[in-house]
Image: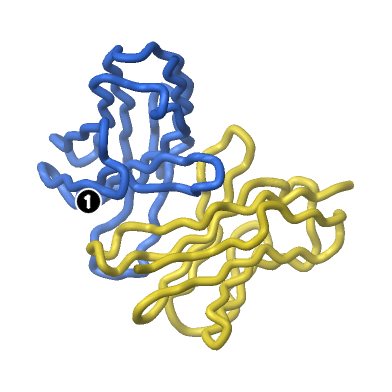
Chain colours: A blue, B yellow
Amino acid sequence: EAQVTQNPRYLITVTGKKLTVTCSQNMNHEYMSWYRQDPGLGLRQIYYSMNVEVTDKGDVPEGYKVSRKEKRNFPLILESPSPNQTSLYFCASGKTASSSGNTIYFGEGSWLTVV
Amino acid sequence: AQSVAQPEDQVNVAEGNPLTVKCTYSVSGNPYLFWYVQYPNRGLQFLLKYITGDNLVKGSYGFEAEFNKSQTSFHLKKPSALVSDSALYFCAVRDLNTGFQKLVFGTGTRLLVSP
């Protein structure tokens, strides 16, 4: 089954304690991305990757890091989480820009609370 | 910049009645438009997209959307609502200025279908 898998799905952590949210896709997609969803703001892009070893900032990259060492994985790293990073996070993947009509597929989301 | 607007935070409809969730867009060039749905405790699921061709696009779960270029709208519709359609719906447009892959989302519309 084609899917984007995120872990953990739910996490409560404390300010400053480094954490990583993993993301894996089994569709051999070149493109992967992270979004955060906040009430009244919709989804905003944090980082994206067009292929292995190629990453770039989205609209709200501050406080986050990513890496793309393998095609299927795209972890999101919060080096020193703060309460304003409490949010619902989505990982996404898709084929690269051979067509603007490509569908982007999303994972089930990771609820992160920073206290 | 590409953007979409969802003017209604919530839409209420009785089961069996037709439903419409509104979306308007602002783009430079041809629009590539998408609808996604988020069920409670589930991820973001792709419903349908408009790339080119027929203005009426059919998607999953009996949903369809009508692209209207003159009104810059892409409203989501269903002839007969089900209680199970209750969810959060997002309209999105492809941002062609960032390598085709970024989706710009609206703020979401919560659909409540009453029995």
The reply, left or right, for residue A31 in relation to residue B107 is left
Q: Amino acid at mark 1?
A: Glu
- Which percent across, then down, holds residue B60? 60, 59
Q: Secondary structure at mark 1?
A: loop
Q: Is residue B61 above or below residue B57?
A: above
| Residue in the foreground of this view, choosing between A52 and A11 | A11
Could you tell me which quadrant the C terminus of chain A lies in?
A: top left
| Residue in the foreground of this view, choosing between A70 and A41 | A41
Could you tell me which quadrant the N terminus of chain A lies in?
A: top left
Q: Which residue is most to the left?
A: A53
The residue located at (55%, 88%) in the rendering is: B70
**Count of labels in the image:** 1
- Which percent across, then down, holds residue B35? 53, 60
Q: Which residue is most to the bottom?
A: B70
- Which percent across, then down, holds residue B80? 80, 63
Q: Is residue A57 above or below residue B100?
A: above
Chain of the residue displaying label 1: A
Count neighbours of disc 1 (C-alpha within 10 A) and say few if under 14, some if 14 to 19, many if 20 or more. some
The reply, left or right, for residue A95 in relation to residue B24 is left
The reply, left or right, for residue B73 in relation to residue B97 is right
Q: Is residue B51 above or below residue B37?
A: below
The residue located at (35%, 78%) in the rendering is: B28
- Which percent across, then down, holds residue A40? 55, 46
The residue located at (51%, 57%) in the rendering is: B106
The residue located at (24%, 68%) in the rendering is: A98
| Residue in the foreground of this view, choosing between B37 and B23 | B23
Q: Which residue is mark 1?
A: A30
